[in-house]
Image (cartoon, helix red, strand yellow):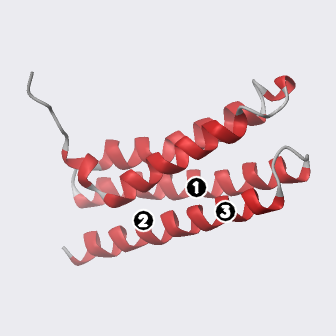
Amino acid sequence: MKEVSFDFEGLSVYQKALDFIDEVYKQTESFPKKELYGLSSQFIRAACSISLNIAEGKGDSNAQFNRFLNIAKNSAKECVVCSTIAFRQGYIKKSKDLDNRQQLAELLKMIAGLQRFLKEG
């Protein structure tokens, strides 16, 4: 069977967002069960929202794609807060919070760069 791919899958920012989702899933596995429908769920949904919005917006007009990229940026910021809460509650170590922040800062820069490219095009 022939492999099928979609244009958004070639975006490096999309691939980085998927890598971040993998990390979030690993981290939330060790969260207390009481957080299953709280912080764990919110962190996973926010992380997934980054790549989902990149995928959803790709292929639309540049203005529409930019709107979806803004939503992806807001989801990345939401992940910063989730990581901070997880650290403050003792669910992750400071080093993991810092790693999350670095990955999210890189994602935000990549999204901003893509937005600049869309405005120029």
Mark 1 against mark 3, which lies toward the viewer?
3
Q: Position of residue 42 (x, y in %)?
A: 68, 36
For the residue marked with disc 2, what is the amino acid?
Answer: Ile
Residue 111 is labelled as: 2
Q: Give left or right: position of 96 versus 53.
A: right
Q: Position of residue 69 (x, y in %)?
A: 41, 57
| Residue occupying image coordinates x 44% and y 55% | 16
For the residue marked with disc 3, what is the amino acid?
Answer: Asp
**Mark 1 surroundings: few (<14), some (14-19) or many (≥20) residues within 10 A:** many
In terms of sequence position, does the residue under pointer 1 or pointer 3 come before the other?
1
Q: Give left or right: position of 105 versus 92.
A: left
Mark 2 against mark 3, which lies toward the viewer?
3
- Nearer the observer, 86 or 71: 86
Q: Give left or right: position of 76 versus 34.
A: left
- Residue 116's place in the image compared with 29, above or below, is below
**Mark 2 surroundings: few (<14), some (14-19) or many (≥20) residues within 10 A:** many
Say which quarter of the image contains residue 29. top right
Q: Position of residue 37 (x, y in %)?
A: 75, 24
The residue that mark 3 highlights is 99
The residue that mark 1 highlights is 76
